[in-house]
Image (cartoon, grey):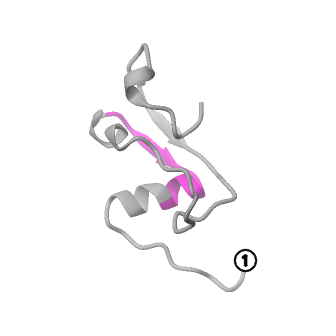
């Protein structure tokens, strides 16, 4: 399901959450962001690529730009 899904719309409580990749950077103006309520559910959250950027920004970390891959 999209990361923009709202927790209030779910008919179940997830046992864990995986935030995966995206072509966006969390600093893009139109970047999607997860419902902030996921961070208070008390379940494990795994961030992969963009998902890790999203986790980092939520916990007041920084995502630095790299000039190479």
Mark 1 residue element: loop
Q: Residue furthest top?
A: 11
In this rendering, would 40 be left or right of 68? Answer: left
Tally the numbered discs: 1
For the N terminus, which image quadrant?
A: top right
For mark 1, does the 10 Å Cα neighbourhood hold few (<14), some (14 to 19), or many (20 or more) residues? few
Residue 65: horizontal and vertical position, in percent? 58, 80
- Answer above or below: position of 42 versus 31: above
Q: Please check the rendered image and state whether residue 54 is part of the magenta-colored stretch, yes or no.
A: no
Q: Residue furthest bottom?
A: 67
- Give the quadrant of residue 14: top left
Residue where numbered disc 1 is placed: 69
- Answer above or below: position of 52 versus 37: below
Residue 13: horizontal and vertical position, in percent? 38, 20
- Give the quadrant of residue 60: bottom left
Residue 55: horizontal and vertical position, in percent? 42, 55
Q: Residue at x 48, y 45 (%)?
A: 46
For the C terminus, which image quadrant?
A: bottom right
Q: Residue furthest front?
A: 29
Comparing 42 with 24, the one in front is 24
Q: Residue at x 27, y 39 (%)?
A: 40
In this rendering, would 12 be left or right of 27? Answer: left
In this rendering, would 35 be left or right of 50? Answer: left
Q: Which stretch did the figure color magenta?
A: 43-53
- Answer above or below: position of 34 versus 52: above
Q: Residue at x 40, y 28 (%)?
A: 7
- Give the quadrant of residue 58: bottom left
């Amino acid at each position: 399901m999209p990361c923009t899904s709202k927790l209030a719309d779910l008919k179940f409580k997830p046992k864990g959450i995986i935030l995966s990749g995206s072509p966006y950077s969390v600093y893009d103006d139109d970047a999607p962001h997860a419902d902030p309520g996921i961070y208070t559910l008390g379940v494990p959250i795994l961030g992969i690529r963009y998902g890790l950027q999203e986790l980092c920004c939520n916990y007041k970390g920084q995502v630095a730009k790299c000039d190479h891959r």
